[in-house]
Image (tube, rainbow, N blue to C red):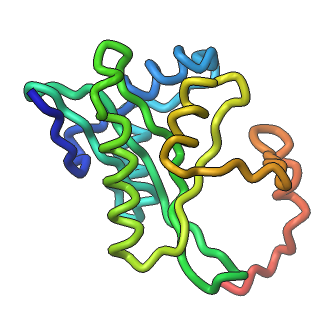
Amino acid sequence: MTATIRPARAEDSETIARLIRELADYERLLDQARAGGEEIRRSLFGPRPFAEALIAEWDGGPIGFALFFHTFSTFRGQPGVHLEDLFVRPTHRGRGIGKALLASVARLAVDRGCGRLEWSVLDWNEPAIGFYRSLGARPMDDWTVYRVDDGPLLRLAEFAPEDRGG
């Protein structure tokens, strides 16, 4: 048996949400996993898709996914791809499925003229770090990711000028 990788479809929304919860559980972040099937359907397959996903299947059943979206590098003057999540169920790890998912996202990036593929990894996730390094990925030690969400995001948005030219 081998895995197949295919683009996600709207009918995969519940499956993607379930895989996201499994990933969140693995990353010890289950309390932060809020996305359900409807949020996934709207965000990936609605009138304005914000992201895309690939599904890995084994024997016809879903066993993993990669969720990604486009970015833009002002320095390069070129689009890129940000891999938001890559997950393979533990029972199917060690079979090259994660590499196949990542390679499939890389192929899409190259085919679309993107200059880079980036992602974040938790500092404690040594298996993932080792896997990524084995593929030639390097950490961006000079950069620190910052985030505003929930209340701080709403408060920051209040400072936006009323006339947004739209």
Q: Which residue is at 48% across, 47% downward? A: 135
Q: Quadrant of the C terminus?
A: bottom right
Q: Quadrant of residue 123?
A: top right
**Front residue of 111 and 99:** 99
Q: Which residue is at 34% across, 23% downward? A: 94
Q: Is residue 120 left or right of residue 156?
A: left
Q: Which residue is at 48% across, 23% downward? A: 23
Q: Is residue 9 left or right of residue 54?
A: left
Q: Quadrant of residue 110?
A: bottom left
Q: How many marks?
A: 0
Q: Which residue is at 41% across, 64% downward? A: 48
Q: Residue 70 in the image: state x and y as whole percent.
A: 50, 65
**Front residue of 29 and 125:** 125
Q: Residue 41 in the image: state x and y as whole percent.
A: 34, 44
42, above or below 131, in the image: below
Q: Is residue 128 left or right of residue 94?
A: right
90, above or below 119, in the image: above
24, above or below 82, in the image: above
Q: Residue 117 in the image: state x and y as whole percent.
A: 53, 60
Report if residue 129 is visible in the image: yes
Report if residue 14 is visible in the image: no
Q: Residue 25 in the image: state x and y as whole percent.
A: 53, 15
Q: Is residue 21 left or right of residue 128?
A: left
Q: Quadrant of the N terminus?
A: top left
Furthest-right residue in view?
Answer: 159
**Front residue of 160 and 85:** 85
